[in-house]
Image (cartoon, rainbow, N blue to C red):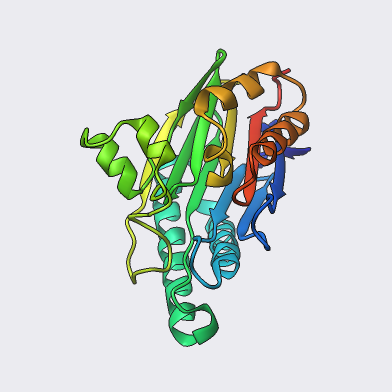
Amino acid sequence: MAVVKTQGSAPLLRCACRTDVGRVRARNEDAYRVAPEQGWLVLADGMGGYRGGDVAAAMAVDVVISRLEAERAVLKDAAALAQVLRLAVAEANAEIHDVGLRRVEVAGMGSTIVIATFLPGSMVCAHVGDSRLYRFRDGALTLLTRDHTLLQEQVDAGMIHPDEARRSRFRGMLTRGLGIERMVELDVAEHETRQSDCYLLCSDGLTDMLMDDEIEAEIGVGGTLDEIAGRLVDVANMRGGRDNVTVILAQGAGSR
């Protein structure tokens, strides 16, 4: 269990992390990094079907954490955080793209990314792809990100029902990913936070196996963050574990 602090302040968060290769894949292409003392949570999922997905995911989280660390002195408010997140993800995207061009064994590699960065009373998040960020508040789970997938665009346009999208064999087709093009569009948002909130960052190895209401129910059962993270991963594997599954859970340090 990690405790998240800001300089000169009381702890902001407790967090727990778990990752698993699943029941089908030969290797884990998810990656995550947390900086507990700063309140930075980063998760990436190497894009399925691309060689070097594990390399791309590891690069993504390392570059983002390194850029946040380098700019730490200016991260005083949400506007500054948003600007640095854009810079960090652009840098990660360019590096993954360039390495993919130079090294034939990882040509075409790519990754998703989802980031949550906390300040007292607020959180700035950013994402590319279909790794997700949820908020659990007052017993209800809310998705704070929107998948960058072909199926999500079809759902938004009313062309397909969400239940059909979940069963489609094309559900993993991304419309955005790190490293695929020289430039990438990043979604950034700010949300107010409450002490009792619980935040979940996860790869699609979880959300392909569990519906949102099932994730909500598992978090609602309670227990420590480590116990909840373990249950989520275990249930995903019990359902078939078709992909690597990674979860990060974070909650206010004063919550019980």
Compared across the picture, whether 169 is left or right of 3 comes to left
- All told, the count of numbered labels is 0
- Residue 59 placement (x, y as % from top left): 57, 67
Instruction: In the rendered view, tell whether residue 249 sits above or below residue 42.
Output: above
Q: Position of residue 6 (x, y in %)?
A: 65, 40
Is 113 situated left or right of 188 in this image? right
User: Does 226 sit above or below residue 74?
Assistant: above
Q: Nearer the viewer, residue 177 or 49?
A: 49
Q: Position of residue 255 (x, y in %)?
A: 69, 19
Residue 101 versus residue 93 in the image, above or below:
below
Quadrant of residue 191 within the rendered picture: top left
- Residue at image x 60%, y 48%? 242
Quadrant containing the C terminus is: top right
Q: Can residue 193 be seen by looking at this rendering? A: no
Q: Horizontal placement of 99 versus 146: left or right?
A: right
Observer-nearest of 17 and 90:
17
Q: Is the N terminus in the top left, top right, bottom left or bottom right quadrant?
A: top right
User: Which of the 4 image quarters holds residue 225?
Assistant: top right
Residue located at (76% from left, 21% from top) = 223
* Percent of width and height locating residue 101: 43, 83
Q: Which residue: 70% across, 27% down?
A: 253
Above-or-below relation of 148 to 252: below
Q: What residue sits 66% from the left and 59% below the top?
A: 28
Furthest residue in direction top, as rendered: 138
Is any atom of residue 91 visible in this view?
yes
